[in-house]
Each structure stands twice: as C-alpha cells, then as structure tokens.
Amino acid sequence: MNRAFVKRSATVAIVAGASVALGIAIARGFSTVVFLPFGLLAFIAFVRVRWLGYAAVLLCVSTLATAYAWPVVSFGGLGFYVSELVLLVAVAATTPAFLRCLRLGWPSTSGLSVGLGLLFSGSVIGVVVGVLAGGSLAGVLNSGRSSLFFLAFVPALVAFENPGGRRIIVWLCGVAAIVIVALQGLQTVIGPRPLLFMIGDFQSLVEYDAALSVLRVRPPGLYLVYVVAAFAISGTLWGSGRRRLLVGFLATVAMLGILLSLNRNMVVGLAGGLLTAFVGSGRGRRSMVLLGSFVMVLVVALVIASDIPGSGPVLTRVQSLAHPERLAATDLADRAYETGLAFKSVSEHPIVGIGWGSSYGATATRLRDAQVTTFDRQWVHNQYLGLWMRMGIAGLLGILLILGSMISGSVVELRGHWNASDAWLAAGVLSSTVALSLSAVVDMVTANPNNVAVLMGVAAAAATLRTSTPTGALEAK
C-alpha cells in the first residue's frame, strides 16, 4: 500500500476524531480552552494535506449545517462561530502556498485576485460607512461578517492546484451531494421534526410552503448540490470513458435535490448554464445529440414523477415558470418590493453605498411562538444590488470581475485548448458559473456563507484550468 496514502489517511482520521472531540467539548462549555490545541492540530493537518483545509470549510458550511448554526467560541470578548474559526485556520495554513500560486502568474488568477481585492475593499468601506451612519461597530461587523467567507478562495486554490487534490475534492463533493439529497428526501417524508440539518435560526430552510401545502426542504448544502449537478451533467455530456454511467447517476440525484427544494431559479440557472456551455464549446452535432438526449430523459422523468403521490406540488412550482402571473403573485412580488427600495438607496448613494447594518427601508414579518413580529429587513435577494448597496461600487465591480474572469477563462479552455476528454471540467466550470450568476439575481449566493464557500471552490477550479491537464474522476480511461 502507498505509504503517502497511509499517512494522509491517518491524518484525516486524526482530524476527524479531533473534530468530534472538539464538538463535544464546545457543547459542554469548554470552547475557549480546548479550541487552541485543536486549532493547532488542524493547522498542522491543513499544512501537510493541502486539500484538507478547503474540504473542512465545505464540511462546516456547505453540507449539513449552516455557517451560523455552530457554537460560538469567545476569545478576548470577541465571539467567533466554529465555522469561521475553521475558515481562518485553513486560510492561515494555506496562505504561503497561495502566495506561491500568485507568483506563478497564472492568467486566470489575476482577475480573480483583483476582484477579491475589490470585494474586501468594499467590505471595509461598508464598515466605515455603516459606523458613520450611526451603527455600532459590533452590529456593523456582524451584519457584514458573511463577506469573510470569500477568503475560502485561498484554501480552495491550494486544494485545486494539484490534480490529485482536485480529484479528491471532486469525489468528496459528489459523495456529499448524495448524502445531502438522501437526508433532504428523508426530511421531506418525516416532516419538520426531528431536524436532520443544523439550521440554527433559519427556519425558512425547512418549512411548509403555504401556497402548496408541502414541506419545503432546502439543505445548507443545496448550492453544493447545484454545482455538482452542473459538473455531473457536463461530465455526462462532454466527458467520455467508463464512468459516464456513474456520473449520470450523480447528475440524476443532484437534479432530484434541486426539484425537492422547489427552487425554480436553480432550474432556470442550470438550463442557462448548460446552454452557455453548449454554445461555448462549439462542438456541434455530438453535443447537440447528447444535450437533446439529456433533456428528453429529464422530461420523461418529470412525466413519470407526476404519477408519484406527493409530487404534485413540486411539479406545480416548476411549471409555474411558464406562468408569469403565478410568479408575480408569489415570490416575485416580495422581491420587487425589496428591490425597489434597494435600488432607491443605491441611486442616492451610488459610490460608497449605505454600508453594513444600515436600513434601506424594507421590513419583513415572521411568525414565532404564534405571534407575528415585524423587523427591519437587512437582506436583498438581488445579490448584485445587495453588494452595491452595502459595499458601494467596489463591491459590484469586484463580483462582476470575479464572475467575468471565471466565464471567460472557462470558455477559452472549452473551445479547444484541451482535448475532448478534458472538456467536461471546463464545461462544468462554465455551466456552474453561469448558473450561479443567474441565481444571484433572485437568491442568496454572495450573502450566504454556505454558498460563498461553494462559489469560491468553482472560482479556484476556474483559476487552475490552465495549470495542468487534470486527472479528475471523470477523465477517460
């Protein structure tokens, strides 16, 4: 047996056991005392196994738990969620390798790095503006703490730099997606209790849809499933080799998770992403046949699903995409309300925005303990408008530069710089980036740490497309 493999496996096992022990210790109130030695152990492990840091971040925030459902650890009066501490340890452990990657001068990395620099500059501006507007420093920092997870790009780039690490992350994401969808289906069957996910105060992730009278389950790792669907379908359409059947199964499972979540924007986003990849590939007849075959399989699956008890609400919500009047009467009416007020704030403060923690005039209601409460709505679903409003023009330009670099780099690679067996990875990056970009118009992508960690993983995959030919899980044999 390979000695290096044994060492890495032992390191992973030790970290996993230590993580369980850490969780028990935190639950018993010994968080500050025990986290330091465990943090040091994790730091050493992340340095030695370069893909482990990003894997740990994904595990904490993009699978079965939301970033803010973890316990809080106090250091000198400051409170950090365990998920944030794992991120910071992973960033500290991988920063030297990350800086080495930048010194290599990768073309795809420069645009992404500048975009991230603009985002963090905008976040600092948002803090200053929020404090000057009268907010407390603690409240302003808490409002903008989700931007911290853009740092996940650092361990993600280090993990994807090596083809072996890239292959492991791909497989881990695939396995995680299967587990997430399995628990999502089980939660749908058993009802809202007991909860199979750690969602903290985010009850909306597992709640009954009033219009359809069906339990709507959106796992914390739903966007990981979304991206896995894009990569798996790309592997089915553009890949080759003996694993196409396995990848097709993974694509089917991921699509099932998207349908169970009742997220219509994901259906539209995924269709747009795959269509962009098809056009960008310039492959012609073969890709057209494969894409048409996949669409036919999906249509047949929906027809069959219409006869399954309890599937009516799912299909009704998906079918409402073809009926604008139904959409306007439900979610889009509320989105138009918040978008209008957010756009008014942006038009009044186009350069620096209104900062973190400041009210833009929108309110929301919540039913808790049989009482309806009204509170200030800090979020806006249009993520481009939200970044512009909170971080100013720097935040908007930053995210546009990041997404633009990801799309342009993957198009270049997909159109001929690689051979046919490698096209699936570039197609996966392109389709998932377009899908995430479209979803960001109406859903929490950049304002949710669970989803930011996934986005940064795709960004790292885009940055490393040109470094070497991958030996990923979908590669032809």
Image (cartoon, grey):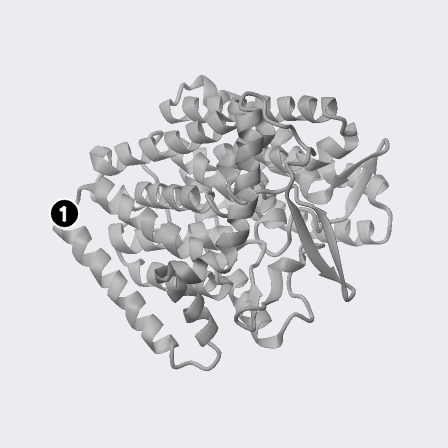
Q: Position of residue 176 (x, y in %)?
A: 52, 56
Q: Please state which amino acid type lies under the numbered disc 1.
A: Gly
User: Front-most of 261 and 238?
Assistant: 261
Question: How many residues crowd around disc 1 within 10 Å: few (fewer than 14), some, or many (20 or more)?
Answer: few
Q: Residue tagged by mark 1? A: 284
Q: Residue at x 51, y 47 (%)?
A: 336
State left or right for residue 180 relative to residue 33: left
User: Front-most of 130 and 242?
Assistant: 130
State left or right for residue 284 relative to residue 2: left
State left or right for residue 175 relative to residue 365: left
Q: Position of residue 88 (x, y in %)?
A: 66, 33
Q: Quadrant of residue 346?
A: top right
User: Front-most of 108 and 43?
Assistant: 108
Residue 385 against residue 381 in the figure, above or below: above
Q: Position of residue 215 (x, y in %)?
A: 57, 70
Q: Position of residue 107 (x, y in %)?
A: 36, 22
Residue 18 against residue 372 in the figure, above or below: above
State left or right for residue 408 relative to residue 446: left
Q: Residue 97: tell me if it is visible.
A: no
Q: Residue at x 36, y 29 (%)?
A: 467
Q: Residue 346: tell me if it is visible.
A: yes
Q: Quadrant of residue 452?
A: top right
Q: Residue at x 34, y 61 (%)?
A: 322
- Counting labels gives 1
Residue 228 against residue 47 in the figure, above or below: below
Q: Residue at x 57, y 44 (%)?
A: 338
Residue lying at the far left of the rendered structure: 285
SS of the residue at dot 1? loop
